[in-house]
Amino acid sequence: MLDGLRTYRMISVMWIRSTMAYRASFAMTTLGNFTATAFDFVAILLMFSRVDALGGYTLPEIAFLYGLSSVAFGLADLCLGSMERLGRRVRDGTLDTLLVRPAPVLAQMAADQFGLRRLGRVTQGTMVLVYALATVDIDWTALKLLLMPVMILSGAGIFAAVFVAGAAFQFVAQDASEVQNAFTYGGTTLLQYPPTVFATELVRGVTFVLPLSFVNWLPATYVLGRPIPLGLPQWVAFLSPLVAAGCCALAGLAWRAGLRSYRSTGS
Amino acid sequence: MVDGADAGFIELDRVEKVFEVRKKSGFMKRERREVRAVDSISFRVARGEMVGYIGPNGAGKSTTIKMLTGILAPSGGRLSVAGIDPSRERRHLAHRIGVVFGQRTTLWWDLPLIDSYKLMHRMYRIPDARYRQNLDRLVELLDLADLLDVPVRQLSLGQRMRGDIAAALLHDPDVLYLDEPTIGLDVISKARVREFLREVNTERGTTVLLTTHDLQDIEQLCSRVMVIDHGRLMYDGPLAGLHEAGDSERTLVVDLERELPPIEVEGARVVKVEGPRQWLAFPAGTSAAPLVARIAAEYPMVDLSVREPDIEAVIAKMYAEKAAT
Amino acid sequence: MDSGRLYLAVGVGGFRRYATYRAATAAGIFTNTVFGLILVYTYTALWDQRPQLGGYDLAQAVTYVWVGQSLFKTLANGGGGVEGELMERIRTGDIAVDLYRPADLQLWWLAADLGRSVFELLARGVPPFVLGALMFDLALPTDATTWLAFLVAVVLAMLVSFGIRYLMALSAFWLLDGTGVAQMVMFVGWFCSGMILPLNVFPGLLGEVVRALPWSALLQAPADVLLGQADALGTYAFQLLWAVLLLAAGRLVQGMATRRVVVQGG
């Protein structure tokens, strides 16, 4: 574990240094990432130019959900986004290069071509979140304040687990890497909108099957003072860290299984 | 005389690797077929040996290397390198081995060459003084000084190969695996790489396992060669013995003054006649000189040349003979 | 006509090449369906508040979603067309080989892209649409003429789409790292084509502007023809206008680029 973190740090630092050597290009690509990801919120603003509420939620409330989802996903994407390239590496045989080095393969994959430009998404998400915090009427308590950073980190953890599990899937099906997009990009888009918009089955699916609800919906509805989806009890709002830990553990197992399968069948 | 642990520094004991291949045999049906890429191979390489590992395409060379480096786990048998089981202790072993893949690079493609070395310095936990010493020495020996700031993707094949070799030796590995290291290189680069490898083996005592298609690589570097075909070890011994074992023949191409009936001479037989030119085959292990002298004494020879047997023909012949027995 | 057969062959080649990626296609259908679902629910909430938003009723809005998802890959609204390959060839210099071929560069790539588009329409277009129709109540026309009119609009949209992407790809002749600009254009295009919100919903001046842009011819135009919200001929005129403008601009830029390559030697 420590070996992995050490490996991750040394490789990502090298990439960051290399990126920063070309300041102008870095600025452009980060700005590009910022605007590309911001379009989602622009769409929401356009919607609200025509309506006052969506699923019963006002714009500041939706901004709150959007900000949380965007920042959590952005952080996970920043740290582990490179994982989705695994299928490509398996196909062109360059995964073997990672296996002959004295470092964990997962850490090497995750840090490879570390994309500092992905801070663009994190930035626009943070801006929207700040706007939300400034405009939403929240009954702040110490517990709710504490929940804020916990939500973001747990959310990032859950998305991180999806990235790793998606990569593990690519050991088996290299061409199907796009399935992952449905869960990652689809997931973050889903969570931008309030749970009241979606059918109960779908909400149940993303709560009990693929626990994306724990990224923002469940804890956020508690903070906003709104009814918890699916009529669940209030304390589920605090389960996010546990769910994140569980997801990461499962993703880790999936990764190990995938790597083992690669090492026994070649590719 | 090496004995004990050093005698079996690299040791394979009845190692097998079986792949399942699925082929479409109809609209929806899939056939499952077993492919024995490596079929019960055993050998030992002593510490400090430089061994060639050759065979035709698909023979199982790369698969063996992958198992030795920990990339693939064997289906059966036992492997041991420096006392370590590669598939069980991959990372532990990685510190003791260096790998050069001819077709792929172990360097970071988009970063300058020196950045790859810096990363390896930290990743392999090489003590600072030794890193500096090794880097300086390797840069000098492989002529990399001007290339250190160049991104790897901008290097030519020969330059990249030298960069890869330096990367493989930076941490003073006990074993060096080279998978087609001279492929695609020009004659001068090949000579340089071969000379360098010779030095590494004699001066540092690094054990070297070299897989290649180029018979010249073997002839110039290895005293011992192993031949693998269809996953089986066909031959394991000195290079000279390979030609004997394969009953291989060299070809003497003789240009006579005029068209003559087939040359009759001791130690060779005519295989082809085309006008004044005749092709004679003679055993590979023997020198051509006395044969040429004998022919020149009896026949009006204008010109001659000698053709070596190629490794594929030797192996094919060996395999055919084994199959026939 | 010989060149006609040549371009047809290029087109068939484009179709075949993309047809080999079976697993990727299946995965893509899944992704499209998931996004379609999310949008349907979002729009339902939206139209619940404003039942006649953008001139659509809910069924039409839901249909719009599935038209968008179905045409997504065909029109390469998120990239993935031949422009990627073209840009790569420009960057590596291989484009010089293409310029010496006795075939027109633009027509060549247009043929290849159309081949790809047709494949994507069948493989990635039909399945999500059928799934959408099974899951929801869509406002589909009952007469064949409307369907035919829709298909014509789709073909015209393919031309406009190629026109945009071709120009974008040619920028690689001048810009060192074309992908930075390309990415931006891709996202602007994705947004302005109405993939996330129908252009008819865009308010005020912004709405007017975005409906006049070429991206409006990609999704909004065919969708409105299918939904009976727009006059077919008027729509074709709009699409054709942009197609001609963009393709002509493409030829102009192509000429400049060719001259540059010849002068510089690659």
Image (cartoon, grey):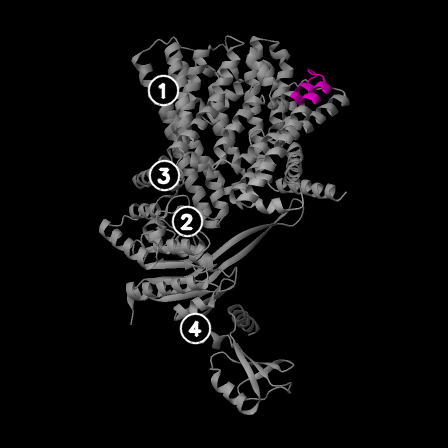
Q: Which residue of the protein is positioned furthest toward the left in this rendering?
A: B129
Name the chain under label 2: A
In the picture, the quarter occupied by the N terminus of chain A is top left
How many angstroms separate mark 4 from mark 2 (CA)? 31 Å
How many angstroms separate mark 2 from mark 3 (CA)? 21 Å
Q: Mark 3 and mark 1, same subunit?
A: yes
How many angstroms separate mark 3 from mark 1 (CA)? 40 Å
Residue A80 x, y percent position in the rendering: 40, 34
Q: Earlier in the sequence, mark 2 or mark 3?
A: 3
Do labels 3 and 1 touch, CB within 8 Å?
Answer: no
**The disc labelled 3 sits on which kind of residue?**
Ser
Where are the magenta residues, as a range?
A: C221-238
Q: Secondary structure at mark 2?
A: helix
Q: Residue tagged by mark 4?
A: B239
Nearer the observer: mark 2 or 1; the answer is 2
Q: Earlier in the sequence, mark 2 or mark 1?
A: 2
**The disc labelled 2 sits on which kind of residue?**
Thr
Instruction: Looking at the picture, tell me which residue is in the foreground, A122 or A73.
Output: A122
Which residue appears at 50% of the width and 8% of the height? A52
**The disc labelled 1 sits on which kind of residue?**
Phe
Q: Secondary structure at mark 1?
A: helix
Say above or below: B40 vs A156. Answer: below
Task: Count how many numbered circles sit on residues in the image.
Answer: 4
Is residue C222 in the magenta section? yes
What is the crowding at mark 1: few (fewer than 14 residues within 10 Å), some, or many (at least 20)? Answer: some
Say above or below: B251 vs A180. Answer: below
